[in-house]
Amino acid sequence: MKRRQLLGQAVIYGLLALFLTVGLLPFAWILSTSLKIPREYYSWPPQWIPSTLNWQNYSLLFARYGFATKLGNSVLVAAGTTLISVFAGAAGAFAMSRYNTGGRALTAWLVIQRMAPPMTVVIALYFLAIKAQIANTRLNLVLAHSSVTLPFCIWMLKGFFDEIPRALDEAAAIDGATRLQTLRLVILPLVAPGLAAAAIFTLIQSWNEFLFAVILMNSDRTQTLPVAIANFITPQTEVQFGPMAAATLIATVPVFVFSLFIQKYLVKGLTAGAVKG
Amino acid sequence: MLQSARLLENLRRDRPARFGWAVMLPCLLLLVLVGVLPIGYTLYASFYKYNFLESIRPQAFLGLQNYGAALRDARFWASMGRTFVFATVTIPLEVLIGLGLALVMQRPLRAKGVFRALLILPYMISPIVLAAIWSMLYSAQYGVVNDLLLRLHLIREPVAWLATARTALGALIFATVWQWYPFSFLLLSAGLDTVPREEYEAGQIDGASGPQIFRYITLPHLLAPLTVLLVVRTIDALKTFALVFSLTRGGPGTSTELVSYYVYARTFGDFKVGYGSALSILLMLAMMVVSLWIARVLQRAVST
Protein backbone atom coordinates (compact mmCIF):
# COMPACT_ATOMS: atom_id res chain seq x y z
CA MET A 1 0.00 0.00 0.00
CA LYS A 2 2.76 2.41 0.97
CA ARG A 3 4.62 1.64 -2.21
CA ARG A 4 1.58 2.21 -4.36
CA GLN A 5 1.02 5.58 -2.78
CA LEU A 6 4.62 6.56 -3.44
CA LEU A 7 4.29 5.49 -7.04
CA GLY A 8 1.11 7.53 -7.36
CA GLN A 9 2.93 10.57 -5.99
CA ALA A 10 5.76 10.04 -8.45
CA VAL A 11 3.34 9.89 -11.38
CA ILE A 12 1.62 13.06 -10.26
CA TYR A 13 4.87 14.99 -9.90
CA GLY A 14 6.11 13.54 -13.18
CA LEU A 15 3.02 14.81 -14.99
CA LEU A 16 3.37 18.17 -13.32
CA ALA A 17 7.00 18.41 -14.42
CA LEU A 18 5.91 17.61 -17.97
CA PHE A 19 3.27 20.36 -17.96
CA LEU A 20 5.73 22.85 -16.51
CA THR A 21 8.35 21.98 -19.11
CA VAL A 22 5.97 22.33 -22.04
CA GLY A 23 4.52 25.55 -20.63
CA LEU A 24 7.77 27.21 -19.67
CA LEU A 25 10.38 25.96 -22.15
CA PRO A 26 9.37 28.48 -24.84
CA PHE A 27 9.93 31.28 -22.31
CA ALA A 28 13.32 29.85 -21.40
CA TRP A 29 14.11 29.79 -25.10
CA ILE A 30 13.35 33.48 -25.64
CA LEU A 31 15.28 34.39 -22.49
CA SER A 32 18.28 32.49 -23.80
CA THR A 33 17.92 33.93 -27.31
CA SER A 34 17.69 37.47 -25.94
CA LEU A 35 21.17 37.00 -24.48
CA LYS A 36 22.80 35.63 -27.63
CA ILE A 37 24.97 37.37 -30.18
CA PRO A 38 24.04 37.03 -33.90
CA ARG A 39 26.51 34.19 -34.53
CA GLU A 40 24.73 32.23 -31.80
CA TYR A 41 21.14 32.90 -32.82
CA TYR A 42 21.94 32.21 -36.47
CA SER A 43 23.46 28.81 -35.86
CA TRP A 44 22.42 25.36 -36.95
CA PRO A 45 21.92 23.15 -35.06
CA PRO A 46 20.62 25.79 -32.64
CA GLN A 47 22.83 26.69 -29.72
CA TRP A 48 20.59 26.31 -26.65
CA ILE A 49 22.69 28.20 -24.13
CA PRO A 50 24.56 31.40 -25.03
CA SER A 51 28.29 31.13 -24.36
CA THR A 52 28.42 34.52 -22.65
CA LEU A 53 25.63 36.64 -21.22
CA ASN A 54 25.26 39.44 -23.66
CA TRP A 55 22.93 42.34 -22.91
CA GLN A 56 23.47 44.19 -26.15
CA ASN A 57 20.11 43.12 -27.61
CA TYR A 58 18.35 45.05 -24.87
CA SER A 59 20.41 48.20 -25.36
CA LEU A 60 19.96 47.87 -29.14
CA LEU A 61 16.18 48.08 -28.67
CA PHE A 62 16.54 51.50 -27.12
CA ALA A 63 19.40 52.74 -29.27
CA ARG A 64 18.17 51.58 -32.68
CA TYR A 65 14.51 50.59 -32.44
CA GLY A 66 13.11 53.51 -30.42
CA PHE A 67 11.82 51.40 -27.59
CA ALA A 68 11.72 54.28 -25.13
CA THR A 69 8.92 55.78 -27.24
CA LYS A 70 7.06 52.47 -27.73
CA LEU A 71 7.22 51.67 -24.03
CA GLY A 72 6.01 55.15 -23.18
CA ASN A 73 3.10 54.81 -25.60
CA SER A 74 2.12 51.42 -24.18
CA VAL A 75 2.24 52.74 -20.62
CA LEU A 76 0.22 55.86 -21.49
CA VAL A 77 -2.44 53.95 -23.41
CA ALA A 78 -2.76 51.25 -20.76
CA ALA A 79 -2.95 53.81 -17.96
CA GLY A 80 -5.50 55.95 -19.79
CA THR A 81 -7.65 52.97 -20.69
CA THR A 82 -7.55 51.66 -17.14
CA LEU A 83 -8.39 55.00 -15.57
CA ILE A 84 -11.37 55.59 -17.85
CA SER A 85 -12.71 52.03 -17.82
CA VAL A 86 -12.49 51.47 -14.07
CA PHE A 87 -13.91 54.85 -13.16
CA ALA A 88 -16.81 54.75 -15.63
CA GLY A 89 -17.24 51.01 -15.14
CA ALA A 90 -17.55 51.37 -11.37
CA ALA A 91 -20.13 54.12 -11.75
CA GLY A 92 -22.14 52.03 -14.19
CA ALA A 93 -21.83 48.84 -12.18
CA PHE A 94 -22.94 50.60 -9.01
CA ALA A 95 -26.00 52.12 -10.64
CA MET A 96 -26.94 48.80 -12.23
CA SER A 97 -26.42 46.87 -9.03
CA ARG A 98 -28.24 49.25 -6.66
CA TYR A 99 -30.80 51.08 -8.78
CA ASN A 100 -31.22 48.63 -11.65
CA THR A 101 -30.47 51.56 -13.93
CA GLY A 102 -31.00 50.81 -17.59
CA GLY A 103 -32.69 47.51 -16.79
CA ARG A 104 -32.84 44.78 -19.39
CA ALA A 105 -32.09 47.05 -22.32
CA LEU A 106 -28.70 48.05 -20.96
CA THR A 107 -27.87 44.48 -19.98
CA ALA A 108 -28.68 43.32 -23.50
CA TRP A 109 -26.52 46.07 -25.00
CA LEU A 110 -23.59 45.11 -22.79
CA VAL A 111 -23.85 41.51 -23.99
CA ILE A 112 -23.88 42.72 -27.59
CA GLN A 113 -20.89 44.97 -27.07
CA ARG A 114 -18.96 42.25 -25.23
CA MET A 115 -19.57 39.97 -28.18
CA ALA A 116 -18.98 42.41 -30.99
CA PRO A 117 -15.87 41.35 -32.87
CA PRO A 118 -13.05 43.89 -32.55
CA MET A 119 -13.09 43.96 -36.33
CA THR A 120 -16.58 45.53 -36.29
CA VAL A 121 -15.46 48.24 -33.89
CA VAL A 122 -12.12 48.95 -35.49
CA ILE A 123 -13.55 49.57 -38.97
CA ALA A 124 -15.65 52.42 -37.63
CA LEU A 125 -12.96 53.80 -35.35
CA TYR A 126 -10.42 53.85 -38.16
CA PHE A 127 -12.58 55.86 -40.51
CA LEU A 128 -14.33 57.98 -37.88
CA ALA A 129 -10.95 58.93 -36.42
CA ILE A 130 -9.87 60.26 -39.80
CA LYS A 131 -12.98 62.43 -39.91
CA ALA A 132 -12.54 63.54 -36.28
CA GLN A 133 -8.83 64.18 -36.96
CA ILE A 134 -7.68 61.92 -34.17
CA ALA A 135 -6.25 59.22 -36.45
CA ASN A 136 -2.90 57.85 -35.25
CA THR A 137 -3.28 59.34 -31.79
CA ARG A 138 -2.99 57.53 -28.49
CA LEU A 139 -6.42 58.91 -27.61
CA ASN A 140 -7.98 56.91 -30.43
CA LEU A 141 -6.32 53.74 -29.17
CA VAL A 142 -7.53 54.44 -25.63
CA LEU A 143 -11.08 54.71 -26.97
CA ALA A 144 -10.66 51.51 -28.97
CA HIS A 145 -9.38 49.60 -25.95
CA SER A 146 -12.16 51.00 -23.79
CA SER A 147 -14.73 49.55 -26.17
CA VAL A 148 -13.61 46.15 -24.87
CA THR A 149 -12.53 46.94 -21.33
CA LEU A 150 -15.46 49.12 -20.31
CA PRO A 151 -18.12 46.39 -20.68
CA PHE A 152 -15.64 44.02 -19.06
CA CYS A 153 -15.20 46.31 -16.04
CA ILE A 154 -18.95 46.88 -15.71
CA TRP A 155 -19.63 43.12 -15.62
CA MET A 156 -16.83 42.31 -13.28
CA LEU A 157 -17.53 45.15 -10.87
CA LYS A 158 -21.27 44.55 -10.90
CA GLY A 159 -20.46 41.14 -9.47
CA PHE A 160 -18.51 42.77 -6.66
CA PHE A 161 -21.24 45.33 -5.94
CA ASP A 162 -23.92 42.62 -5.92
CA GLU A 163 -22.00 40.75 -3.23
CA ILE A 164 -22.27 43.63 -0.78
CA PRO A 165 -25.46 43.15 1.24
CA ARG A 166 -28.13 45.76 0.72
CA ALA A 167 -28.63 45.82 4.48
CA LEU A 168 -25.49 47.94 4.64
CA ASP A 169 -27.04 50.59 2.36
CA GLU A 170 -30.16 50.61 4.49
CA ALA A 171 -28.22 50.84 7.75
CA ALA A 172 -26.28 53.80 6.37
CA ALA A 173 -29.52 55.48 5.25
CA ILE A 174 -31.03 55.04 8.70
CA ASP A 175 -27.92 56.60 10.20
CA GLY A 176 -28.65 59.62 8.03
CA ALA A 177 -26.07 59.15 5.30
CA THR A 178 -26.94 60.59 1.90
CA ARG A 179 -26.80 58.29 -1.13
CA LEU A 180 -23.48 59.73 -2.17
CA GLN A 181 -22.04 59.31 1.32
CA THR A 182 -23.21 55.71 1.39
CA LEU A 183 -21.42 55.09 -1.89
CA ARG A 184 -18.24 56.88 -0.86
CA LEU A 185 -17.90 55.80 2.76
CA VAL A 186 -19.60 52.40 2.94
CA ILE A 187 -19.60 50.71 -0.44
CA LEU A 188 -16.48 51.88 -2.21
CA PRO A 189 -14.11 50.76 0.56
CA LEU A 190 -15.70 47.31 0.41
CA VAL A 191 -15.27 46.93 -3.35
CA ALA A 192 -11.71 48.30 -3.26
CA PRO A 193 -10.17 44.85 -3.88
CA GLY A 194 -12.57 44.39 -6.79
CA LEU A 195 -11.58 47.77 -8.22
CA ALA A 196 -7.91 46.84 -7.94
CA ALA A 197 -8.49 43.48 -9.63
CA ALA A 198 -10.51 45.07 -12.45
CA ALA A 199 -7.78 47.69 -12.88
CA ILE A 200 -5.07 45.05 -13.21
CA PHE A 201 -7.11 43.00 -15.68
CA THR A 202 -7.72 46.13 -17.75
CA LEU A 203 -4.09 47.13 -17.60
CA ILE A 204 -3.00 43.71 -18.87
CA GLN A 205 -5.64 43.64 -21.63
CA SER A 206 -4.65 47.05 -22.93
CA TRP A 207 -0.91 46.38 -22.65
CA ASN A 208 -1.28 43.11 -24.57
CA GLU A 209 -3.76 44.30 -27.20
CA PHE A 210 -2.68 43.92 -30.81
CA LEU A 211 -5.52 44.12 -33.35
CA PHE A 212 -6.63 47.70 -32.60
CA ALA A 213 -3.04 48.84 -32.10
CA VAL A 214 -1.75 47.54 -35.40
CA ILE A 215 -4.67 48.80 -37.46
CA LEU A 216 -5.09 52.20 -35.82
CA MET A 217 -1.48 53.21 -35.16
CA ASN A 218 0.34 53.77 -38.43
CA SER A 219 2.99 56.17 -37.25
CA ASP A 220 6.30 55.31 -35.58
CA ARG A 221 5.73 58.01 -33.00
CA THR A 222 2.53 56.57 -31.52
CA GLN A 223 2.97 52.82 -31.99
CA THR A 224 2.77 50.59 -28.93
CA LEU A 225 5.00 47.69 -27.94
CA PRO A 226 2.92 44.90 -29.56
CA VAL A 227 3.11 46.67 -32.93
CA ALA A 228 6.87 46.99 -32.57
CA ILE A 229 7.06 43.25 -31.91
CA ALA A 230 4.99 42.52 -35.01
CA ASN A 231 7.53 44.50 -37.04
CA PHE A 232 10.22 42.13 -35.80
CA ILE A 233 8.26 39.04 -36.85
CA THR A 234 7.79 40.20 -40.44
CA PRO A 235 10.79 42.44 -41.10
CA GLN A 236 11.92 44.09 -44.33
CA THR A 237 15.16 42.11 -44.27
CA GLU A 238 16.37 39.17 -42.16
CA VAL A 239 14.68 38.38 -38.82
CA GLN A 240 16.71 39.72 -35.88
CA PHE A 241 16.06 36.96 -33.36
CA GLY A 242 18.10 38.53 -30.55
CA PRO A 243 16.42 41.93 -30.34
CA MET A 244 13.06 40.30 -31.09
CA ALA A 245 13.42 37.94 -28.12
CA ALA A 246 14.48 40.83 -25.90
CA ALA A 247 11.46 42.87 -27.00
CA THR A 248 9.17 39.92 -26.33
CA LEU A 249 10.49 39.58 -22.80
CA ILE A 250 10.14 43.29 -22.10
CA ALA A 251 6.49 43.04 -23.13
CA THR A 252 5.90 39.91 -21.06
CA VAL A 253 7.63 40.41 -17.71
CA PRO A 254 5.30 43.21 -16.47
CA VAL A 255 2.31 41.01 -17.31
CA PHE A 256 3.72 38.13 -15.27
CA VAL A 257 4.35 40.43 -12.31
CA PHE A 258 0.85 41.90 -12.45
CA SER A 259 -0.71 38.48 -12.86
CA LEU A 260 0.60 37.54 -9.41
CA PHE A 261 -1.75 40.08 -7.85
CA ILE A 262 -4.89 38.69 -9.44
CA GLN A 263 -4.45 34.95 -8.89
CA LYS A 264 -7.47 34.94 -6.60
CA TYR A 265 -9.70 36.67 -9.12
CA LEU A 266 -8.62 34.84 -12.26
CA VAL A 267 -11.72 32.73 -12.74
CA LYS A 268 -14.01 35.62 -11.91
CA GLY A 269 -12.18 37.89 -14.31
CA LEU A 270 -12.03 35.36 -17.12
CA THR A 271 -15.71 34.73 -17.12
CA ALA A 272 -16.99 38.24 -16.33
CA GLY A 273 -20.14 38.50 -18.40
CA ALA A 274 -19.19 35.57 -20.58
CA VAL A 275 -22.58 33.96 -20.25
CA LYS A 276 -25.43 35.16 -18.14
CA GLY A 277 -28.66 33.21 -18.27
CA MET B 1 -43.85 59.67 -27.45
CA LEU B 2 -46.48 59.48 -24.75
CA GLN B 3 -44.59 56.66 -23.12
CA SER B 4 -41.31 58.50 -22.95
CA ALA B 5 -43.13 61.53 -21.53
CA ARG B 6 -44.50 59.31 -18.82
CA LEU B 7 -41.06 57.85 -18.23
CA LEU B 8 -39.64 61.34 -17.76
CA GLU B 9 -42.50 62.22 -15.43
CA ASN B 10 -41.84 59.12 -13.33
CA LEU B 11 -38.16 59.92 -13.33
CA ARG B 12 -38.84 63.40 -12.01
CA ARG B 13 -40.72 61.94 -9.06
CA ASP B 14 -38.53 58.89 -8.45
CA ARG B 15 -35.43 60.23 -6.72
CA PRO B 16 -33.51 56.93 -6.33
CA ALA B 17 -33.90 56.18 -10.05
CA ARG B 18 -32.75 59.69 -10.82
CA PHE B 19 -29.72 59.19 -8.63
CA GLY B 20 -28.97 55.93 -10.44
CA TRP B 21 -29.04 57.64 -13.83
CA ALA B 22 -26.91 60.50 -12.54
CA VAL B 23 -24.23 58.08 -11.36
CA MET B 24 -24.54 56.11 -14.58
CA LEU B 25 -24.11 59.18 -16.80
CA PRO B 26 -20.31 59.11 -17.38
CA CYS B 27 -20.49 55.39 -18.06
CA LEU B 28 -23.40 55.82 -20.45
CA LEU B 29 -21.70 58.57 -22.42
CA LEU B 30 -18.59 56.46 -22.79
CA LEU B 31 -20.61 53.41 -23.81
CA VAL B 32 -22.23 55.45 -26.54
CA LEU B 33 -18.88 56.84 -27.69
CA VAL B 34 -16.94 53.56 -27.80
CA GLY B 35 -19.77 51.10 -28.36
CA VAL B 36 -23.02 52.36 -29.85
CA LEU B 37 -21.36 54.85 -32.18
CA PRO B 38 -18.73 52.56 -33.77
CA ILE B 39 -20.96 49.52 -34.05
CA GLY B 40 -23.76 51.71 -35.36
CA TYR B 41 -21.43 53.31 -37.87
CA THR B 42 -20.18 49.98 -39.16
CA LEU B 43 -23.77 48.82 -39.51
CA TYR B 44 -24.56 52.02 -41.42
CA ALA B 45 -21.52 51.64 -43.68
CA SER B 46 -22.53 48.06 -44.45
CA PHE B 47 -25.53 49.36 -46.42
CA TYR B 48 -23.39 51.59 -48.65
CA LYS B 49 -20.95 51.36 -51.49
CA TYR B 50 -18.00 52.77 -49.64
CA ASN B 51 -14.70 52.50 -51.43
CA PHE B 52 -12.27 54.50 -49.33
CA LEU B 53 -9.79 54.93 -52.14
CA GLU B 54 -12.43 56.80 -54.16
CA SER B 55 -13.70 59.12 -51.45
CA ILE B 56 -13.63 59.38 -47.68
CA ARG B 57 -17.42 59.36 -47.49
CA PRO B 58 -19.80 56.52 -48.39
CA GLN B 59 -20.67 56.73 -52.10
CA ALA B 60 -24.05 55.16 -52.74
CA PHE B 61 -26.80 53.45 -50.80
CA LEU B 62 -26.95 49.78 -51.73
CA GLY B 63 -29.52 48.40 -49.33
CA LEU B 64 -28.71 44.77 -48.65
CA GLN B 65 -26.50 44.25 -51.71
CA ASN B 66 -23.27 44.00 -49.68
CA TYR B 67 -24.86 41.27 -47.61
CA GLY B 68 -26.08 39.45 -50.69
CA ALA B 69 -22.60 39.57 -52.16
CA ALA B 70 -21.10 38.39 -48.85
CA LEU B 71 -23.42 35.39 -48.71
CA ARG B 72 -22.28 34.41 -52.22
CA ASP B 73 -18.61 35.02 -51.39
CA ALA B 74 -16.95 31.61 -51.60
CA ARG B 75 -13.75 32.86 -49.95
CA PHE B 76 -15.76 34.14 -46.98
CA TRP B 77 -17.44 30.78 -46.50
CA ALA B 78 -14.13 28.99 -46.92
CA SER B 79 -12.63 31.17 -44.18
CA MET B 80 -15.65 30.40 -41.97
CA GLY B 81 -15.19 26.68 -42.60
CA ARG B 82 -11.48 26.92 -41.79
CA THR B 83 -12.33 28.74 -38.58
CA PHE B 84 -14.78 25.97 -37.76
CA VAL B 85 -12.04 23.36 -38.24
CA PHE B 86 -9.65 25.50 -36.20
CA ALA B 87 -12.17 25.68 -33.34
CA THR B 88 -13.21 22.04 -33.42
CA VAL B 89 -9.59 20.91 -33.18
CA THR B 90 -8.23 23.44 -30.67
CA ILE B 91 -11.09 23.46 -28.17
CA PRO B 92 -11.33 19.69 -27.46
CA LEU B 93 -7.53 19.51 -27.15
CA GLU B 94 -7.54 22.41 -24.71
CA VAL B 95 -10.33 20.80 -22.72
CA LEU B 96 -8.61 17.41 -22.53
CA ILE B 97 -5.22 18.80 -21.55
CA GLY B 98 -6.76 21.32 -19.17
CA LEU B 99 -8.89 18.63 -17.55
CA GLY B 100 -5.89 16.34 -17.13
CA LEU B 101 -3.95 19.13 -15.48
CA ALA B 102 -6.91 20.08 -13.30
CA LEU B 103 -7.29 16.48 -12.09
CA VAL B 104 -3.56 16.31 -11.31
CA MET B 105 -3.77 19.57 -9.40
CA GLN B 106 -6.71 18.32 -7.32
CA ARG B 107 -4.27 16.11 -5.42
CA PRO B 108 -2.74 17.48 -2.25
CA LEU B 109 0.51 19.10 -3.39
CA ARG B 110 3.18 21.26 -1.87
CA ALA B 111 3.40 24.84 -3.11
CA LYS B 112 0.26 24.48 -5.16
CA GLY B 113 -0.12 28.25 -5.54
CA VAL B 114 3.33 28.57 -7.07
CA PHE B 115 2.67 25.73 -9.51
CA ARG B 116 -0.65 27.26 -10.51
CA ALA B 117 0.91 30.70 -11.08
CA LEU B 118 3.62 29.15 -13.28
CA LEU B 119 1.26 26.87 -15.18
CA ILE B 120 -0.97 29.71 -16.34
CA LEU B 121 1.85 31.94 -17.63
CA PRO B 122 1.25 31.10 -21.32
CA TYR B 123 -2.32 32.25 -20.89
CA MET B 124 -1.30 35.72 -19.67
CA ILE B 125 0.81 36.74 -22.68
CA SER B 126 -0.16 38.97 -25.57
CA PRO B 127 -1.30 37.24 -28.78
CA ILE B 128 1.54 39.00 -30.57
CA VAL B 129 4.05 37.67 -28.04
CA LEU B 130 2.62 34.23 -28.72
CA ALA B 131 3.20 34.81 -32.42
CA ALA B 132 6.75 36.07 -31.83
CA ILE B 133 7.69 33.10 -29.65
CA TRP B 134 6.35 30.54 -32.09
CA SER B 135 7.81 32.28 -35.13
CA MET B 136 11.20 31.69 -33.50
CA LEU B 137 10.44 28.10 -32.51
CA TYR B 138 8.99 27.21 -35.93
CA SER B 139 11.75 28.93 -37.90
CA ALA B 140 12.68 26.68 -40.82
CA GLN B 141 16.35 27.58 -40.72
CA TYR B 142 17.16 28.09 -37.05
CA GLY B 143 14.09 26.75 -35.24
CA VAL B 144 14.26 24.57 -32.20
CA VAL B 145 11.13 22.61 -33.19
CA ASN B 146 12.98 21.22 -36.22
CA ASP B 147 16.03 20.55 -34.07
CA LEU B 148 14.03 18.51 -31.55
CA LEU B 149 12.09 16.53 -34.14
CA LEU B 150 15.27 15.77 -36.10
CA ARG B 151 16.97 14.53 -32.95
CA LEU B 152 13.97 12.32 -32.23
CA HIS B 153 14.06 11.09 -35.84
CA LEU B 154 10.44 12.13 -36.36
CA ILE B 155 11.33 14.14 -39.46
CA ARG B 156 14.14 13.61 -41.95
CA GLU B 157 14.87 17.20 -42.90
CA PRO B 158 13.89 20.63 -41.52
CA VAL B 159 10.29 21.60 -42.29
CA ALA B 160 9.14 25.15 -43.05
CA TRP B 161 6.14 24.75 -40.78
CA LEU B 162 4.51 28.09 -41.51
CA ALA B 163 5.28 28.19 -45.22
CA THR B 164 3.93 24.74 -46.08
CA ALA B 165 0.24 24.57 -46.90
CA ARG B 166 -0.13 21.14 -45.31
CA THR B 167 1.36 22.13 -41.93
CA ALA B 168 0.64 25.85 -41.50
CA LEU B 169 -2.85 25.58 -39.97
CA GLY B 170 -1.67 22.76 -37.71
CA ALA B 171 1.21 24.93 -36.54
CA LEU B 172 -1.20 27.75 -35.64
CA ILE B 173 -3.44 25.25 -33.85
CA PHE B 174 -0.57 23.86 -31.81
CA ALA B 175 0.55 27.34 -30.70
CA THR B 176 -3.03 28.25 -29.79
CA VAL B 177 -3.53 25.13 -27.71
CA TRP B 178 -0.24 25.84 -25.94
CA GLN B 179 -1.50 29.27 -24.92
CA TRP B 180 -5.05 28.32 -24.00
CA TYR B 181 -5.08 25.00 -22.16
CA PRO B 182 -4.32 26.92 -18.93
CA PHE B 183 -7.65 28.69 -19.42
CA SER B 184 -9.60 25.45 -19.43
CA PHE B 185 -7.43 24.24 -16.54
CA LEU B 186 -8.51 27.27 -14.49
CA LEU B 187 -12.19 26.95 -15.31
CA LEU B 188 -12.36 23.19 -14.86
CA SER B 189 -10.40 23.41 -11.59
CA ALA B 190 -12.99 25.83 -10.30
CA GLY B 191 -15.66 23.32 -11.38
CA LEU B 192 -13.91 20.42 -9.67
CA ASP B 193 -13.69 22.46 -6.47
CA THR B 194 -17.48 22.59 -6.35
CA VAL B 195 -17.90 18.79 -6.12
CA PRO B 196 -18.77 17.99 -2.48
CA ARG B 197 -16.38 15.49 -0.81
CA GLU B 198 -19.35 13.46 0.47
CA GLU B 199 -20.47 12.63 -3.06
CA TYR B 200 -17.10 11.07 -3.85
CA GLU B 201 -17.18 9.13 -0.60
CA ALA B 202 -20.71 7.94 -1.21
CA GLY B 203 -19.66 6.84 -4.70
CA GLN B 204 -16.73 4.88 -3.35
CA ILE B 205 -18.85 3.20 -0.66
CA ASP B 206 -21.36 2.17 -3.32
CA GLY B 207 -18.47 0.56 -5.20
CA ALA B 208 -18.52 2.81 -8.27
CA SER B 209 -15.51 2.51 -10.59
CA GLY B 210 -13.26 5.45 -11.39
CA PRO B 211 -14.88 6.17 -14.77
CA GLN B 212 -18.33 5.82 -13.22
CA ILE B 213 -17.47 8.30 -10.50
CA PHE B 214 -16.20 10.71 -13.15
CA ARG B 215 -19.29 10.28 -15.34
CA TYR B 216 -21.99 10.49 -12.66
CA ILE B 217 -20.43 12.61 -9.92
CA THR B 218 -17.71 14.81 -11.40
CA LEU B 219 -19.01 15.54 -14.89
CA PRO B 220 -22.34 17.13 -13.88
CA HIS B 221 -20.37 19.71 -11.90
CA LEU B 222 -18.24 20.49 -14.95
CA LEU B 223 -21.09 21.28 -17.34
CA ALA B 224 -21.37 24.91 -16.26
CA PRO B 225 -17.65 25.70 -16.69
CA LEU B 226 -17.67 23.73 -19.95
CA THR B 227 -20.45 25.95 -21.26
CA VAL B 228 -18.47 29.07 -20.48
CA LEU B 229 -15.37 27.54 -22.00
CA LEU B 230 -17.03 26.50 -25.24
CA VAL B 231 -18.75 29.84 -25.73
CA VAL B 232 -15.69 31.94 -24.92
CA ARG B 233 -13.29 29.86 -27.00
CA THR B 234 -15.63 29.62 -29.99
CA ILE B 235 -15.94 33.38 -30.01
CA ASP B 236 -12.16 33.64 -29.67
CA ALA B 237 -11.69 31.38 -32.68
CA LEU B 238 -13.89 33.71 -34.71
CA LYS B 239 -11.74 36.62 -33.48
CA THR B 240 -8.31 35.01 -34.10
CA PHE B 241 -6.21 37.62 -35.81
CA ALA B 242 -2.73 38.31 -34.44
CA LEU B 243 -1.36 34.83 -35.12
CA VAL B 244 -2.60 34.78 -38.69
CA PHE B 245 -1.65 38.38 -39.38
CA SER B 246 1.91 38.09 -38.19
CA LEU B 247 2.82 34.47 -38.93
CA THR B 248 1.19 33.57 -42.24
CA ARG B 249 -0.91 36.47 -43.61
CA GLY B 250 -3.48 33.80 -44.33
CA GLY B 251 -1.11 31.80 -46.50
CA PRO B 252 0.37 29.81 -48.04
CA GLY B 253 -2.43 30.35 -50.55
CA THR B 254 -5.44 30.74 -48.32
CA SER B 255 -4.64 27.74 -46.15
CA THR B 256 -4.64 29.68 -42.85
CA GLU B 257 -7.08 32.46 -43.77
CA LEU B 258 -9.39 32.50 -40.75
CA VAL B 259 -12.51 34.63 -40.93
CA SER B 260 -11.30 37.64 -38.90
CA TYR B 261 -8.24 37.93 -41.09
CA TYR B 262 -10.34 37.70 -44.22
CA VAL B 263 -12.56 40.55 -43.02
CA TYR B 264 -9.42 42.55 -42.29
CA ALA B 265 -7.90 41.85 -45.69
CA ARG B 266 -11.11 42.92 -47.44
CA THR B 267 -11.53 46.11 -45.41
CA PHE B 268 -7.97 47.33 -45.01
CA GLY B 269 -6.25 45.55 -47.88
CA ASP B 270 -8.39 46.83 -50.73
CA PHE B 271 -10.33 49.43 -48.68
CA LYS B 272 -13.79 48.15 -49.66
CA VAL B 273 -15.17 49.50 -46.41
CA GLY B 274 -18.85 48.94 -47.10
CA TYR B 275 -18.32 45.32 -48.04
CA GLY B 276 -15.89 44.74 -45.15
CA SER B 277 -18.45 46.24 -42.77
CA ALA B 278 -21.11 43.85 -43.99
CA LEU B 279 -18.73 40.93 -43.47
CA SER B 280 -17.93 42.09 -39.94
CA ILE B 281 -21.63 42.41 -39.09
CA LEU B 282 -22.19 38.87 -40.36
CA LEU B 283 -19.27 37.77 -38.20
CA MET B 284 -20.92 39.42 -35.21
CA LEU B 285 -24.22 37.67 -35.92
CA ALA B 286 -22.39 34.36 -36.27
CA MET B 287 -20.85 34.87 -32.84
CA MET B 288 -24.19 35.57 -31.25
CA VAL B 289 -25.97 32.66 -32.86
CA VAL B 290 -23.19 30.21 -32.07
CA SER B 291 -22.83 31.25 -28.45
CA LEU B 292 -26.58 31.25 -27.79
CA TRP B 293 -26.85 27.84 -29.42
CA ILE B 294 -23.98 26.34 -27.39
CA ALA B 295 -25.36 27.82 -24.19
CA ARG B 296 -28.81 26.40 -24.91
CA VAL B 297 -27.59 22.91 -25.81
CA LEU B 298 -25.49 22.65 -22.68
CA GLN B 299 -28.20 24.19 -20.53
CA ARG B 300 -30.44 21.36 -21.66
CA ALA B 301 -27.70 18.86 -20.82
CA VAL B 302 -27.50 20.33 -17.31
CA SER B 303 -31.23 20.06 -16.69
CA THR B 304 -31.45 16.39 -17.74
Image: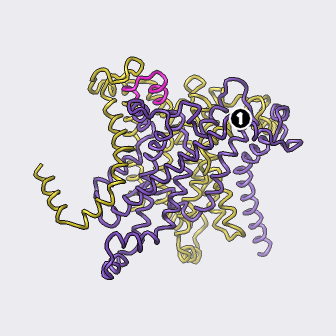
Residue type at mark 1 is Tyr
Side of A145 where B120 appears, left or right: right
Side of A154 where B104 appears, left or right: right
* Residue A200 is covered by the magenta coloring: no
Type of colouring: by chain
Estimate the x, y position of residue B225 in percent, counting from the top left: 49, 59
Side of A214 where A101 appears, left or right: left
Q: How many marks?
A: 1
Q: Disc 1: which chain?
A: B
Q: Is residue B277 visible?
A: yes
Q: Residue furthest left?
A: B2
Front position in the image: A253 or A13: A253
Q: Quarter-wise, where is residue A177 in the image?
A: bottom left
**Residue at left 64%, top 37%?**
A229
For label 1, the residue is B138
Q: Colour of chain A?
A: purple
* Magenta-highlighted residues: B262-276
Q: Main secondary structure of the magenta part?
A: helix
Estimate the x, y position of residue A79 in percent, counting from the top left: 53, 51
Front position in the image: A216 or B280: A216
Estimate the x, y position of residue B40 in percent, counting from the top left: 32, 38
**Residue at left 60%, top 45%?**
B126
* Residue B265 is covered by the magenta coloring: yes
Q: Quarter-wise, where is residue A39 in the image?
A: top right
> What letter labels the chain drawn in yellow?
B
For the residue labelled by badge 1, is the local secondary structure a helix, a strand or a loop? helix
